Amino acid sequence: MGDTPELLVIAHRNTTLQSIVGQLHDVGLANQCTISGALVGEIESMSKCEADLILVTSKVVLDMVRQFLHKDTHYIIAKRSINFAKIKPLISLPRGSHLYVVNDLKESAEEAIQTLLEVGIEHHYVPYYGQKDLDPSITIAVSPGESHMVPPAIKTKMEIGNRLLDMTTLYEIYEYFGISTFASDNQLSARYIQSIMSLVKELNLEITQSQGLQKSIEGIVDQIEEGMIVYDQSNNIISINMQALKLLNRSYMDLIREDMSQIPQAFYQAFMKVEMEKENFIDVEEESFYVRKKRIFVGAKVFATIILFDKMKRIKSIETKYHKNEREKGFVAKHTFSDIKTNSSKMLSLIDKAKKLAHSDSTIFIYGETGTGKEVMAQAIHRASERNHGPFVAVNLAAIPESLAESELFGYEKGAFTGANQKGNMGLFERAHKGTVFLDEIGDASPIIQNRLLRVLQEREIQRVGGGQPIPVDVRVIAATNKDLRKLIEQNKFREDLYYRLNVLPIPLIPLRKRKEDILLLSELFAKEFEEKLQRFGLPFSQDALNAMVRYDWPGNVRELRNTIEYLAHVCNGEVDLSALPSNILEKQATTSLSRQQEDILLYRLEEKGFLQDCQQILIILNQLGSKGTGRRSLLKVLSEDNQDLSEQKMRYRLEILSDMDLITVGQGRRGTTINENGKKFLRYIENQIVS
Ligand SMILES: Nc1ncnc2c1ncn2[C@@H]1O[C@H](COP(=O)(O)OP(=O)(O)OP(=O)(O)O)[C@@H](O)[C@H]1O
């Protein structure tokens, strides 16, 4: 398990440094290495300048710092391109306009001019880096991030933003660290293309007039090392790069502006089916490919879909250069924390806690009802841990037949039992060496397995079935269950000592009925997913249907919700109304009393607004005061004694909401505000929700 590699960015100006470091974060590199930044001036005063890789923002910067770098330090000189999202005003000028390009150093100004010309924005540029004499005929100054340096005599300033790293430099960094550009938390190509495509969309007209720019965009798209196809909402291909044409064995003219269905059928079928925003693996004509599909938004609207794909073989060869990957054996965690979608503040703080726990190496214990996302959480923890380059081995203890469980988990020596492989076999614990073992449904482990697990956790070594020397294993254990282990201990079905060994860092997952706000969020996400998979139009819900979904208890949690949306996407043609919902949801409604439904909705509304904690506190105080009630100012005072400071205006607003919900009666004039019967009942309800 190596430490996270370090990348140090060195720049001359602070704004450049900030924007380059920001860009590296944007493309997801921070998930793979530690990024730090330093200015040239700081390097001079550093006693040692160490990192696995140094990125200098230009050749000039390299010359300035070279003497301070260790001779073996590996460095990359950044190639930088313009920020496509910011050049619209510059393109709108008549071709050949006379402009100053402003920067702090002569070389930087000249370099910026070179880049502008390279991307095909053809004006007459003059470098400006603080000279006294100005050409009075030039009235416009363009600045990549240094507009404060524009001389006051110049009337028009155009800020085109700091120049960003170009794709080839980003690839060079990824390649150096042996990181696949396909990892699911890696946004490299997709982010880059998003900004270019947004511009293409906005500038359609200008671009057709400016052939030069069109060519340069094609050039950038061809720099992408993966195959890339962008198609619009009517399935027409709007951009395709050389690599994609090679992989599909087609020519540019055959495909550009054609319908997606014109690509080879096997690819077409597979591309349409794969999930959005996920790593997908497909086989076409005995070749395996990675595929990622992503929507491109312009503003809030979907503008196009992008597909990035490549041969597994090529990606694997990049990955194995730096570290061994267990992907081919299937011992890989697909999910990261960004896959856990939630709007619930309780879930968000749980995720925060899990992120911190991921870095410790102790045993983690996840408990929660079925379908609440225990496995997703376990995978995310592994991916965020220092073991993320090692294997993630998941074992479902409820699914392995008892007779096989021991040898599956711990392996066996040759000849250990009839039918055993003559060479002996490695168990899952050994396979997880340097990685994580996820023991799902730990409550179902037999007494023999519980015994053996206890030993592994104590000794950090295993013994194969059939004897032999103990084998040391370096694994982190994450266990999960939906059973009440304490009850199992009382019934003598679970070892208490094992429970304490496992329950070192507990993570309690929250059922969906206690985070109602997620029902709408996840319904929308799953609806989008199935729209795409089934190639259907949107899946809008009527208000009644939505209310019923929110009121329902979802005993199968997120999994049940996902299945329900999949079912609806198959059976509903237009809007989903109440009658379309599966019968279990409708039946459950009938037995729920009206006031309970209202309470659910009120709770959901308060949580959604982020007022729940304040409002609960207000209700508690009013409840203690009984019929006497109190005024706004005294309420504020009591709250601030509890370290909960609210402005008078915020307090007024919260009281208005509670009054609108008919939970309190706001007194007129000198009469105090009091809690009413509904309010008391609701308070009991939220206290129960939070405790249980
Ligand atoms: N917050 C979430 N956002 C998006 N998808 C989620 C979320 N939580 C769970 N899911 C999805 O719900 C399904 C069930 O999740 P998972 O298998 O992790 O649950 P579990 O608690 O391990 O279930 P079980 O106890 O039945 O094994 C999966 O398809 C998972 O991707």
Image (cartoon, rainbow, N blue to C red):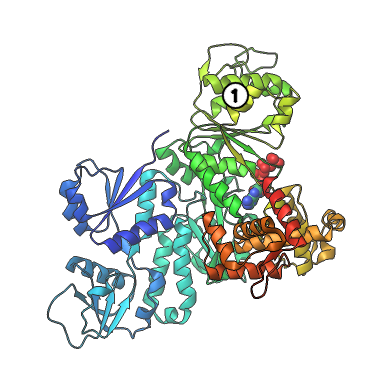
Q: Position of residue 437 (x, y in %)?
A: 57, 32
Tell me which residue sits at (38%, 59%) in the image: 22
Is residue 619 in sight in this rendering? yes
Q: Quadrant of residue 637?
A: bottom right
Q: Is mark 1 within 8 Å of ligand 1?
A: no
> Which quadrant is home to the C terminus?
top right
Report whether 573 appears left or right of 436. right
- Disc 1 marks a residue whose amino acid type is Gly
Tell me which residue sits at (45%, 67%) in the image: 195
Q: Position of residue 494 (x, y in %)?
A: 70, 24
Quick check: 149 above or below 557? below
Q: Position of residue 421 (x, y in %)?
A: 63, 18
Quick check: 153 above or below 663? below
Q: Give the class, few, some or many, for how many residues have Cα within 10 Å of label 1's Cα (few <14, many ≥20).
A: many
Which residue is outermost to the bottom? Answer: 137
Report whether 665 appears left or right of 29. right
Tell me which residue sits at (68%, 13%) in the image: 417
Q: Quadrant of residue 304?
A: bottom right
> Which quadrant is home to the N terminus?
top left
Q: Position of residue 458 (x, y in %)?
A: 54, 20
Which residue is tagged 1?
Answer: 427
Report whether 571 appears left or right of 614. right
Is residue 530 in sight in this rendering? no
